[in-house]
Image (cartoon, rainbow, N blue to C red):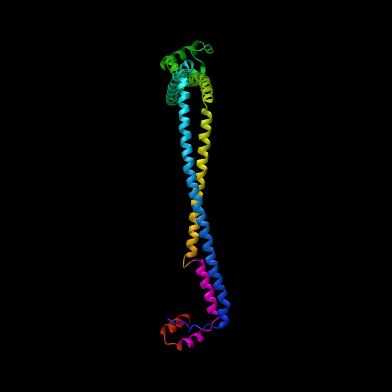
């Protein structure tokens, strides 16, 4: 379609043309800048990926060396008869503690379930409060005979044994378990001290420290890679927005064009369109009007 008919008034086009040129130039500069930054991010990512591979290889080697030295430490400790005997005793004691703690839990549950029956028995609580069957019981005469009759009726001696067992045994077991746990801790501390001496002599502690540092570096590098991937995604979104034909630059250009049209007399366009043979000119002017 011929467009020579579109002879905008010189002053109008002259005023708006630099703005269009500036907009186009700005769009191209923004695209170039974002593309350059994105390519640099991609290059940084590739560099980090390669560094991560190298670091992973170092970490694998360090872990293999750590395992090898750990095996040497274990072998040397197994030749120490005192250490082996102490370890066996500690293992037996720990197993016994686990059984005792399991029994304590069972007794705690049993006490919680059965003690209320004793506590809610009026006659049983009466005899307990009077100190019946203890040196503190001071009743005489008829009261003493009645208390004996009540005790026989509720089978007080047997009931008291069950009551005292449920009330005192859990706490006694806790005390015994605590003492046994303290004794085991002493043994375990001695075992750990002996193990650390051998481990230090063979360099195991240094190996462990090296593996820990390499693991920390790997985690930090993975975090950097993740953050860089997020930045790359954001950069690509910005590029897509600029290159989008309906993006912000397009909207700004439409605004400039509308402002220019607002300062043009469409009657002049209509007259010029009628001077051409193409009907498309007339249709465009009709829509603009």
Residue 211 coordinates in the image, percent (x, y): 50, 34
In the rendered view, would you say 75 is above or below 271? above
Tell me what residue is drawn at x 48 percent, y 27 percent: 69
* Foreground residue among 24 and 255: 24
Q: Is residue 264 magenta?
A: yes
* Foreground residue among 273 and 198: 198
Residue 269 coordinates in the image, percent (x, y): 49, 85
Q: Quadrant of the N terminus?
A: bottom left
Say whether residue 23 is visible.
yes
| Count of numbered circles on the image | 0
In the rendered view, would you say 253 is above or below 57? below
In the rendered view, would you say 37 is above or below 58? below
Say whether residue 119 is visible.
no
Q: Which corner quadrant of the image does residue 283 belong to?
A: bottom left
Tell me what residue is drawn at x 44 percent, y 14 percent: 157
Q: Is residue 36 magenta?
A: no
Residue 190 coordinates in the image, percent (x, y): 53, 20
**Which secondary structure class fits the magenta region best?**
helix
Residue 82 coordinates in the image, percent (x, y): 48, 15
* Foreground residue among 250 and 140: 250
Q: Which stretch appears magenta?
A: 247-273
In the rendered view, would you say 126 is above or below 66? above
């Amino acid at each position: 379609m011929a467009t020579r008919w579109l002879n905008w008034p010189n002053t109008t086009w002259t005023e708006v043309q630099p703005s269009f040129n500036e907009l186009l130039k700005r769009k191209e500069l923004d695209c170039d800048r974002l593309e350059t930054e994105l390519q640099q991010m991609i290059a940084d990512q590739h560099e980090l990926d390669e560094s991560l591979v190298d670091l992973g290889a170092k970490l694998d080697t360090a872990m293999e060396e750590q395992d090898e030295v750990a095996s040497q430490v274990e072998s040397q400790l197994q030749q120490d008869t005192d250490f082996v005997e102490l370890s066996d005793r500690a293992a037996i004691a720990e197993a016994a503690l686990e059984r005792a703690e399991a029994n304590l839990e069972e007794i705690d549950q049993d006490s919680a379930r059965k003690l209320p029956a004793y506590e809610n028995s009026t006659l049983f609580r009466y005899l307990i409060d009077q100190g019946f069957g203890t040196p503190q019981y001071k009743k005489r005469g008829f009261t003493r005979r009645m208390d004996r009759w009540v005790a026989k009726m509720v089978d007080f001696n047997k009931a008291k044994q069950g009551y005292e067992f449920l009330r005192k045994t859990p706490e006694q077991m806790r005390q015994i378990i605590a003492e046994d746990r303290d004794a085991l801790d002493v043994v375990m501390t001695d075992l750990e001290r002996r193990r650390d001496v051998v481990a230090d002599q063979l360099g195991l502690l240094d190996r462990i420290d090296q593996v820990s540092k390499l693991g920390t570096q790997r985690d930090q590098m993975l975090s950097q890679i993740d953050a860089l991937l997020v930045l790359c995604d954001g950069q690509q979104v910005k590029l897509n927005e600029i290159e989008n034909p309906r993006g912000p630059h397009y909207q700004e250009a439409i605004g400039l064009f509308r402002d220019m049209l607002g300062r043009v007399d469409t009657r002049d366009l209509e007259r010029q369109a009628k001077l051409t043979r193409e009907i498309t000119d007339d249709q465009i002017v009709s829509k603009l009007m």
